[in-house]
Amino acid sequence: MSKNFEVEMLLDIKTPMRDGVNLSSDIYLPKSDGPFPVILMRTPYSNNGDDIVKTSISYANRGYACVIQDVRGRWDSDGEYYPFHQEAKDGYDTQEWISKQRWCDGNIGMIGGSYLGAVQWLSAPLKSNHLKAIVPRVMCTDYYNGLVHPGGTFQLNVMMTWGMRTSGRTAQTIDYHNWTKAFHSLPLADLGGSTGRSMAFWQDWHEHQNDDEYWDEVNTERRFSDIEVPALIMGGWYDLYATDAFDNFNGMRQQGGSELARQSQLIMGPWPHRLSQSTKTGDIDFGSPSKIDLDGIERRWLNRWMLGEDNGVDDEAPLRLFIMGTNEWRDEQEWPLARTDWQTWNLHSEGRANTARGDGTISLIESGEELPDTFTYDPEFPVQTIGGNNCCSPDIVPWGPYDQRPVENRGDVLCFTTEPMDSDFEVTGPVKLKLYASTDAVDTDWTAKLVDVSPDGYAKNLCDSIIRARYRKGFEKSDLLKPGRVYDYDLYVGVTANVFKAGHRIRLEISSSNFPRFDRNLNTGATLGYDSEVKVATQKVFHSSKYPSHIVLPVIQRT
């Protein structure tokens, strides 16, 4: 395809939806005889921003028409904005409208990340005959567990900062808030009282604490079989949607509604939410190989499925992973990897695993008769978030890998650590924890974090997660605890691809808070988000023959 077209711009073109609301579309056309294949981007962040306009012009230079649309209720589009729930129908209606324009050849592809990825996943199951391919970057398809209520908690930092930024028709500044005060304010549902800003969707997020019909309405994870177009998925190990990237990949490969859909692919790099913008994420520079041309890869994908270009995409491995530690790319065929050696590493201590200086260990030796480890969880003094799978304001709450030793010096953080590795030890895949624990509260949280400890003591976080005890049986309804009883919890710690170099150690952190990434469990069992009373809880973690707490590591043999 020629790369020399000049570009014609058609701005603020009113695009009618089925209910009569007009959305604003900016259109970039090659100055040539049409019709053209069309790239569609739908955004709440303004269709007039520099980056998105440059992307559109670049595609138009190459012979694609490009449509950038402000979603309903944002910027130049009419209607009222409400996150996610209106994007399926609006996306489909836009695709149908585009297909009827003289400059469209009937082929539409969608691109974009984060919310721009959400609108792709939400509209694809409606099966427009004109949609041929999608390239969703960094987005979940289960908005309950993937975004708003992971593990049954409330993803406080993201929902408050992102929600406030997008709460008006145009971008809202959040630079002048006292975030320490805002994050700590109770009751949590009273956002207006803590920040001066009221948002209808904030209230709805708190009203729908269970995974109910409100969340099912926008859950594409349950509708992969309705998607008939191939998806090129892009994600990062330190993005908040790292786990979701693989759920989407497997969902499309295994359940996609056509042979083409089941040819979907995934690229996973050592990146935060902003993919491949730098070789450095958090504290760690992953080297020049880590930064790749995702836009060029995206264009090859679209050229294949929209233009029928025989460019080898069909023959490429469906999975491309960046392996941290050795800092190299590797092609794979499936997830988890078929050659995975699932190893059970058991927790041990003499009851003093508190802090990294305690006696907590992990080994392949089975648990014996050991004392449980005890700590106090005080919601007034939660464990601080230091990096990790966060978004979208690293100046407020950092993202990526950082030294976890400040956290590991706290008495309410249990640390279980291996002996130094004799040789390079690769862990690539989903990491799971079976935890046996008790509390003297009727509800509490349990957190887990996988850490790579260097010989000099630097403790690099790899992945982490949380479970709210009342949702240990599932997210459809809550079930409070009986104080003092030992319960078993299944924590999906996360996904990673990391080589623990010889001399490094593997560490597992266990605690009851990770704040302000997640809201604090106040331990009272009251209605979440509407309570201000705080209870201090005494927590016990068990590791014995009766209660064998352990972590399952996906080990890959190095050749």
Image (tube, rainbow, N blue to C red):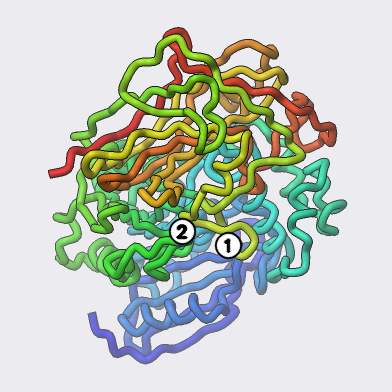
Q: Residues within 10 Å of mark 1 (few under 14, many from 20)?
A: few
Identify the amino acid type marked 1: Pro
Compared with 39, 157 (above or below) is above
Which residue, given by chain and number where applicable, does mark 1 sit on? 394
Question: Circles 1 and 2: CB distance less than 8 Å?
Answer: yes
Label 1: which secondary element: loop
Residue 114, percent from left and from top? 51, 58
Residue at position x 76%, y 28% from top?
536
Residue 96 or 408: which is nearer the viewer? 408
Identify the amino acid type marked 2: Pro
Label 2: which secondary element: loop
Compared with 144, 22 (above or below) is below
Q: How many marks?
A: 2
Q: Which labelled disc corresponds to residue 272?
A: 2
Residue at position x 47%, y 22% from top?
349
Residue 408, percent from left and from top? 55, 42
CA distance separating discs 1 and 2:
10 Å
Residue 409, percent from left and from top? 58, 42
Whether residue 122 is visible, yes or no, is: no
The answer to which image quadrant residue 496 occupies is top left
Specify which label sits upstream in the sequence, 1 or 2: 2
The residue at the far right in this view is 193
Compared with 335, 416 (above or below) is above
Compared with 348, 95 (above or below) is below
Whether residue 180 is visible, yes or no, is: yes
> From the viewer's perspective, is 503 left or right of 222?
left
> From the viewer's perspective, is 465 left or right of 269?
right
Q: Quadrant of the C terminus?
A: top left
